[in-house]
Each structure stands twice: as C-alpha cells, then as structure tokens.
Image (cartoon, helix red, strand yellow):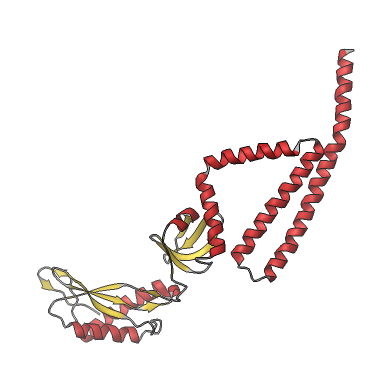
Amino acid sequence: MDWEHTLNSYTDGLLNFAPRLAGAIVVLIVGLWIVKKLLTIMDRLLEKSALDEEIRSFLSSLASLAMKFIIILIAAGIIGFEVSALIGVLAGVVFAIGLALQGFLGNFASGITIVFFKPYKIGDWVQIADFFGRVENIQIFNTTLVTPGDKTLIIPNGKVTEDIITNFSTRGHIRLELMVTMPYEESFPKVQQTIMETLQAYPKILKDPSPIIGIESFDSHNIIVSVRPYIHPDNYWEVTFDLNRMIKEAFYKKGIKVAYSEGVELGIIGE
C-alpha cells in the first residue's frame, strides 16, 4: 500500500506539473519567435536611423539579451519558480561573478564609452599606446587593429580608455619619418634639395602640410638627416618602400655619397 500511495502521489504531481511545463515550453518557443521578429524590425529601424554601425550593433545586442531574459523569467514563473527569488539569486550570482571578473566589467564599461563617445570608428588609423594600425572591429570587450604589416592586434577596451589615443584619420594624414645618413664632407643644401625634388615628384606625398627635411643629429661618423613627408595612412608601407628606393636612386644620379662603414673610407653608393 505504501508503494501504491507513493506512486499515486508522483503520478498526481506529474499530471499537475505537465501542463505548467508544456505552457513554459510554449512560452519559450513563441516568445523567442516574437523576440526574433521584433529584433528584425528593430534592426531595420536602426539601419534607417543616423546612428553609427557600432551603436546600432550594441543596441541590438542589448535588446536581444533583455527580451530573452524576460521570456525566460515568464517561463520560469509558469513552471512555479518564485520569480522574485530567482531574480535575487541571479543578482547574487552576477555580483559574485562581477567581483571575480572586474577586468571584464571594466572592458565592458570602456567598450560602451568608445561606442558612444567615438574617439575612433571602424576604418580609422589610430595609435593606442605603442600600437599602430587600422581599426577593423569595435566590440564590447576589445578593439581589433590591423597593422601595416598585416598583423591583427586585439586590445582590451580598458587599456584603450586608460591610455593615449592618437587618431590619424581625423586629420586625414600621417607624417612618415625616414632617416638618411650623409658624410660630414657632403653639402647638406645639396642633399636637402635632392630629397625635396624626389618628394615633390612622387604623387602620393601630400603638398599640404609640406614635407620637412632637416638634420636630426650628429653621429661619430655621419650626419643623420630626417625626412618627414605627409601621406595618407593607407599608403604607409608603399610610400616607405618607394621613397627609400627613390632617394637612393636620386643620390646615385647626383653623385651624393652615403655614410656607412667600409673600413676607414667612405663607400660609394651603387645604383
């Protein structure tokens, strides 16, 4: 009789629980379908707005998370969970996780700052601390840069906001910094004119601001000449390689010697 009573109790409990479980499953299925439709409508409205791509993506993700959480709470309430108690437990769990993951929360907060205050946007050339590259992606926790050497850098947003950000795309140009050596016996005005003529003949060098050519420092065996033309950030490596080649060729044609160690004598530069 005890086994029969226990079995009847479990059966009655299952029969009472089954409709609630079925209702919760229906709510989840229908609710998630409705959320999907609402998000589609929201994405279309956001695309028509004047908001940037980064902000649209952030708002869409946030709305999706919030609506799905509400659906789960409704389903849990139908099954019989105390929603208020469940929220309290979740809040405690979130607080505990937050203490353990303070760095992630800091990156999250920094991501929101970057998205809304926009110190840079996707496609900009920036320097963050010692890292230089084009912004490929802005996510909630990190920013992805692609360097001129085609390396991918993933920088935590917390590091971005706590450091100095240099946005080269805001002004539309960057300054290229090249170094050329010349012997002390060579005429600097001649070297300066030759380099300037080379820069002026190259179409990817910007006319405004004007290139700067000057003596950087005096070494024990040579003079360091600084060559600083302005270029578009997209042309960084191409212009660097081209100018080094063109300056070497111009020096050869003008008979200008370049200082480098070859015993105790000056070496002659080849074509």
Answer with the quarter of the image where residue 251 lies.
Answer: bottom left
Can you name the residue that lies furthest to the top here? Answer: 1
Residue 66 drawn above or below residue 99: below
Q: Height in image: 107 above or below 130? A: above
Horizontal side, residue 117 vs residue 253: left or right: right
Residue farthest to the left? 264
The front one of 134 and 159 is: 159
Quarter containing the C terminus: bottom left
Residue under the image location 89 percent in, 17 percent down: 5
Percent position of residue 120, x then y: 50, 66
- Quadrant, the N terminus: top right
- Residue 233 lies, with reference to residue 70, above or below; the image says below
Q: Position of residue 262 (x, y in %)?
A: 14, 69
Instruction: Say how many tags the image has.
Output: 0
Task: Give the left or right position of residue 113, taking residue 261 as reference.
Answer: right
**Residue located at (54% from left, 57% from top):** 111
Left or right: 144 with respect to 174?
A: right
Question: In front: 12, or 118?
Answer: 118
**Which of the two residues, 145 or 20, is positioned nearer the viewer here?**
20
Residue 106 pos. (x, y %)? 51, 50
Point 67% across, 38% down: residue:
88
72 vs 227, left or right, is right
User: Does residue 209 show up?
Assistant: yes
On the image, the x and y values in percent for residue 38 come to 76, 59
Residue 6: which quarter of the image? top right
The residue sitting at 35% across, 74% down in the picture is 176
